[in-house]
Amino acid sequence: MPFSRLIWEQMQYIPEIYHDKISLIFDRSTIDVSRLQGSVEIALRNHPVFSMMITEQGEQYYQPSENILKGKFHSVEYQLAENKLTMSFDVSRILGDSFSFRLLFQDIFRAYKGKPLFEDNYLEFLKQYEQLKTTPPYEEDRQWYEENFGEVAYSVRPNVDTDQPLSQFGEEATLIDDLAELKPLFQHVCDQYKLSVSQFISLCVTLSIMDYNDTDSAALTWAYLGRESMEEMAIFGSLHRDVPIQIRRGGAVCLQKQDLLKQIQTQFTQSIAHSLYPYTLLAPQNQIWNYAVNVLTSITEDRLTQYAPIPVQLDIEERRQAMSLLDVDVYEDDLVIAYRYSASHYKPESIRRFADLVRKYVEWLID
């Protein structure tokens, strides 16, 4: 998949890039340890991606693994203490997107309860995707993106504070902004314009980029789940697509709230409809979009373990190396926004100023 290809290329220079490390911690008195370990193996074998091999040339092929707990891009380890069991997952994002983790844990808990798992048709999906790349719709999507995003007359991020090259990300820093008190009015506007919470926040972010940079147009990428059928919802893989969005407010009419909301609604509808072509990930346009703000729909820790049949504690290792200039993680359940940024490019007070602009536009649009 396109995002996996991007990570493969980056791994040639930074081997540990985009590794997620998550541990599940159980009270041993509440769980059958051997049964849980067996459930993990069942879940991993249900997803072909954990048996995929990649050659030095970046070509991918399927080879059933004898030791499904350890591969080139993933590992599962257990630590038994007197009172607890710790199950640690180290998985490269080359294998799957953030939605995939939730799916894997759901499968582990389903297997533990003796329930059947939904079939993962990852191999067939890959085959169909390769075939689609030679079809007219794929070319039509490319042309549509070129026509709508080919001329770069818009800002894609708040101006950085330093002369550090954009490609040299520093240590990651995070600013959290809690908007929970705004949720009732927030949800009403989203329902009215058929927008998800993160799509609504994307409008606020683009408007904030304009204010921050003193421009009349701005763009960003939004992480679209990319799973368009029930069968695809069962696939562990990097199926998500980074969809570009551009907003303009060149005249007085465009400054009206309803016009901006309709504009973002149309932008999402059209860009998602043409998202078969991975426009933002391919050269030469990736030299722009690799450094654009990316808005993501994130899930809380409770959501990752909501299907657990027994109490479980989650421990997620925090990343230290920034993977982008600025990601805006939107936790839709709690209405919390996490601004994750490269500390070598932005000062904390600059991100605080930007977050205040986003909050200002949230409040303005729901008023």
Image: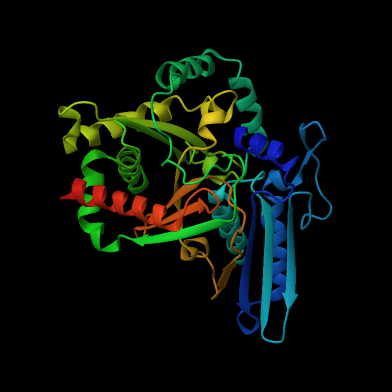
Q: In this view, does 67 lie to the left or right of 45?
A: right
Residue at the spot 36% in from the left edge and 50% down from the top edge: 354
The relative height of residue 81 versus residue 15 in the rendered view (above or below) is below
Residue at the image point whose x is 62% and y is 74% from the top: 25
Residue at left offset 53%, top offset 15%: 139
Q: Among all residues in the image, which is located at the extreme front?
A: 163
Res 19 visible: yes
Q: Vertically, is 151 above or below 68?
A: above
Name the colouring of the figure: rainbow
- Where is residue 207? Give x, y as percent: 30, 39
Taking the image as shown, residue 270 lies to the left or right of residue 132, namely left
> Which residue is more in the foreground, 141 or 113?
141
Q: Which residue lies furthest to the bottom in this view?
A: 82
The quarter of the image holding the N terminus is: top right
40 to the left or right of 163: right
Residue 131 drawn at (x, y percent): 63, 21
- Residue 53 image-quadrant placement: top right
Count of numbered badges drawn on the protein: 0
Q: Looking at this view, is 164 or 252 the one in front?
A: 164
Q: Closest to the observer: 337 or 21?
A: 337
Relative height, residue 35 to residue 169 (above, below) = below
Residue 285 place in picture, x, y as percent: 54, 25
Residue 296 locus on image (x, y percent):
45, 47
Q: Is residue 231 visible?
A: no
Q: In this view, does 66 lie to the left or right of 221?
A: right
